[in-house]
Image (cartoon, rainbow, N blue to C red):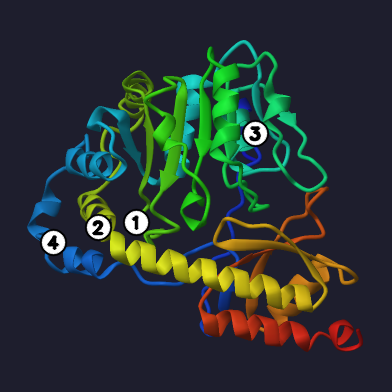
């Protein structure tokens, strides 16, 4: 800790991302990246990109990208906000809407970056417990608040809420902003984007990192009422007026256009998720029902930390969280068929698994 740090920075506990190993021959199932390459249209956009343009600043409004997203989701361009990954979109969201007298409501087990933003911006948070089966109960959010945020499907549990339950919350909660973080929605859940015209306090945030295979490009977006989007633009233009570079904008547009590839690859991931769940259950794991590109699993007899260490010794990375309530679970990203078979085969070789 440095004496030059401000007091606010000294008290921060930063978000810890999943490990990005430098070595080769590692099966990486710890950061929920897509196992498939980006769309061929993305590769074509990269090859055709005019690098001479890099001497210029990118379009600060990302107008062409906003138009592509608006057309894809059947909304207006003024209802779309884009940022450098959904994490940046979330950061601007917390600043724009959640610095309120009343506390922000959020699940007690969810994306840990929410708490980081609360600490960074001095936002009071109230954590609403999940049910014992890890379900979010939106009826519990019927209380005074300065905003509500939840991930749907939730992370790291993978459980999803129905659109009817989300709308019921919006019908009750009309005076503060409700944010639905849909980073994993494309793997089997229902998007709330179709509700944004009906509820002006609803903001839906998505990313191209997961289902569109563009984690390395860092493109996220939000869809909501023009009033909410204007609030986000005010924050963005007070922080960084050029958040998305030219290449990121071009590849994002290409990824959105190739809907056939998107559907094909997401369906393959869903199919592999179900196969992996069945295989893990046959080995004594309990699997939380998932609508994401990962499964959240605990073993009946073997501790999660032990299993993580064993897999790591065999060059297979999965994610383990040490916080109470989920410390005996592993979050396992769905990889290729070869990778998932290798993980299952490895687990079968664990000494305690053999003796079962």
Residue under numbered circle 1 = 217
Upstream in the sequence, badge 4 or badge 3?
A: 3
Residue 300 visible in the displayed image: yes
From the image, tell me which residue sits under label 4: 49
Q: Residue 251 carries which label?
A: 2
- Of callouts 1 and 3, the N-terminal one: 3
Tell me the residue at 37%/59% (across/down): 212
Check whether the beta carbons of the residues at disc 1 and disc 2 lie within 8 A of each other.
yes
Is residue 174 left or right of 225 when viewed as pictured? right
Could you say which is closer to the camera, residue 42 or residue 12? Answer: 42
Q: Which mark is residue 10?
A: 3
What residue do we see at 53% from left, 81% from top? 337
Looking at the rendered image, the quarter that the N terminus falls into is top right
Say which residue appears at 61% left-offset and 22% top-offset.
123
Q: Which mark, residue 310?
A: none
Q: Nearer the viewer, mark 1 or mark 2?
A: 2
List x then y, in percent, for residue 316: 64, 78
Sequence-earlier tag: 1 or 2? 1
Q: Distance between the residues labelled 1 and 3?
A: 31 Å
Residue at x 22%, y 34% (from the top left corner)? 61
| Residue 202: x %, y % from top left | 46, 26
Q: How far apart are marks 4 and 2 (CA)?
A: 10 Å
In which image quadrant can residue 354 be found? bottom right
The Cα atoms of the two marked residues, 4 and 3, are separated by 43 Å
Asked whether 103 or 6 is in front, the reply is: 103
Left or right: 216, with 62 as reference point: right
Q: Is mark 1 on a helix, strand or loop?
A: loop
Earlier in the chain: of badge 4 and badge 2, it is 4
């Amino acid at each position: 800790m440095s004496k030059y740090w401000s007091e606010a920075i000294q008290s921060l506990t930063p978000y810890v991302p999943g490990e990005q190993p430098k070595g080769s021959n590692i099966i990486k199932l710890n950061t929920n990246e897509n196992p498939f390459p980006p769309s061929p249209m993305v590769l074509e956009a990269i090859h055709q990109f005019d690098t001479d343009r890099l001497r210029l600043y990118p379009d600060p409004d990302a107008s062409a990208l906003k138009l592509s997203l608006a057309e894809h989701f059947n909304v207006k361009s003024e209802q779309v906000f884009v940022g450098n990954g959904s994490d940046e979109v979330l950061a601007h969201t917390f600043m724009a809407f959640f610095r309120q007298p009343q506390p922000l409501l959020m699940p007690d087990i969810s994306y840990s970056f929410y708490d980081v933003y609360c600490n960074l911006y001095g936002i009071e948070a109230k954590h609403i417990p999940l049910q014992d089966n890890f379900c979010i109960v939106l009826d519990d959010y019927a209380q005074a608040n300065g905003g509500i945020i939840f991930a749907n499907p939730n992370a790291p549990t993978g459980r999803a809420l129905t659109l009817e339950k989300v709308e019921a919350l919006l019908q009750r909660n009309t005076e503060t902003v409700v944010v639905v973080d849909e980073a994993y929605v494309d793997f089997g859940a229902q998007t709330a984007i179709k509700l944004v015209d009906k509820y002006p306090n609803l903001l839906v945030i998505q990313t191209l990192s997961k289902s569109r295979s563009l984690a390395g490009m860092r493109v996220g977006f939000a869809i909501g009422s023009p009033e909410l989007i204007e609030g986000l633009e005010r924050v963005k233009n007070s922080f960084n007026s050029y958040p998305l570079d030219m290449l990121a904008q071009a590849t994002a547009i290409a990824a959105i256009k190739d809907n056939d590839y998107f559907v094909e690859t997401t369906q393959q991931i869903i199919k592999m998720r179900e196969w992996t769940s069945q295989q893990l259950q046959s080995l004594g794991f309990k699997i939380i029902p998932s609508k994401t590109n990962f499964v959240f699993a605990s073993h009946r007899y073997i501790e999660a930390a032990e299993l993580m260490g064993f897999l790591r010794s065999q060059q297979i990375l999965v994610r383990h969280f040490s916080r109470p309530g989920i410390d005996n679970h592993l979050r396992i990203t769905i990889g290729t068929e070869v990778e998932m078979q290798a993980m299952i085969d490895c687990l079968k070789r664990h000494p305690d698994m053999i003796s079962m």
